[in-house]
Amino acid sequence: MDIEIISDEFRLQQANRYSLWLYLSDNDCSFVILDDTLKLFVGIKRVSHISLTKTIELFDELSAIPFSRVSMALDAQPSLMIPTALFRQENKRNLLAFTAEFNEEHEVIEQFIPSLSMVNLFAVAPSFKSFIAPYFPKANLIHNSSAMLIAAANLSRSVDSNPTMGIRITDNHLYVCVFDNGKLILSNYFAIKTCDDIVYWLLRLCEQFGFQTSKVRIYFQGVDNLLDERIVALKQHFAKLNLLPLPDMFQLTPEIKAEAKEIFTDLFYLPICEL
């Protein structure tokens, strides 16, 4: 489902008070617009199965607006989370190469997550940076797994002491972060092809950590569509499977709140990545 809502609260003549948070994958482009002063989301858009032509048209439209900040979240490559205390700039390439394959010409990006004292490492192709440069020359590149990590961390502290998993499902990978008693114990990617692969890895993780499937809380990032075969398959095994809720530190205009679950809910956590 494609969706676009730009609230009447958005003032183009005051565009420098807003930040733009884009999410781009192989077949989906979404964004949210945040009023940085009021901490209020005033715009959302999702275009599924987007073509290159439509992407360029969207970038043309957005780049004409002088946002105070533009950040772009990517899913293209698995990333590596490490504690900030262990990060060394000169070692970042070797660290990422230990866990993920990427071409020699790719640039390794480090994204600091101050709220969790973590660094997220991921690789970006020069061709991609060249593609976005004419539109967003100062765009800050971040990895979408960071949003899920922050969301799961917040939820693990706010409900009960049961284990918490945040999962992000793409075409080829399952990202999982696991928190137990508010502490991060796993952040990892698993290769997937079918629904059975997703179920298998989550059941294996519960087995390895000694979690009861009836108690572990799992939050997924996807659109609120309970007919999705992946969600149906997971619900057969996990009683506490829920769509990732919206963050409570930001507000949404009424019309956006009514439709917010029609886009990936972890998009609303992207601004927290840089707090």
Image (spheres, rainbow, N blue to C red):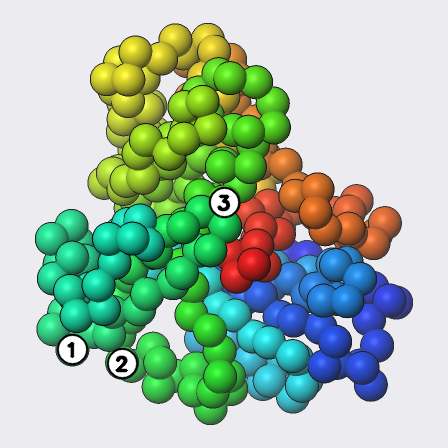
Residue at which label 1 appears: 105
Which mark identifies residue 150?
Answer: 3
Residues at marks 2 and 1 touching, judged by CB atoms closer than 8 Å:
yes
Judged left or right of residue 35, residue 229 is left
Q: Nearer the viewer, mark 2 or mark 3?
A: 3
Image coordinates for residue 102, horizontal then vertical, percent? 16, 64
Image quadrant in which you'd find residue 79 = bottom left
Distance from the alpha carbon under mark 2 to that under mark 3: 28 Å
Residue furthest front in the image: 85
Image coordinates for residue 61, horizontal then vertical, percent? 64, 82
Type of amino acid under label 2: Pro
- Between 49 and 180, the residue placed more toward the observer is 180
Residues at marks 1 and 3 touching, judged by CB atoms closer than 8 Å:
no
Judged left or right of residue 23, residue 102 is left
**Residue 37 appears in view:** yes
Residue drawn 40% across and 60% down? 112
Residue at which label 2 appears: 126
Callout 3: helix, strand or loop? helix
Residue drawn 18% across and 58% down? 96
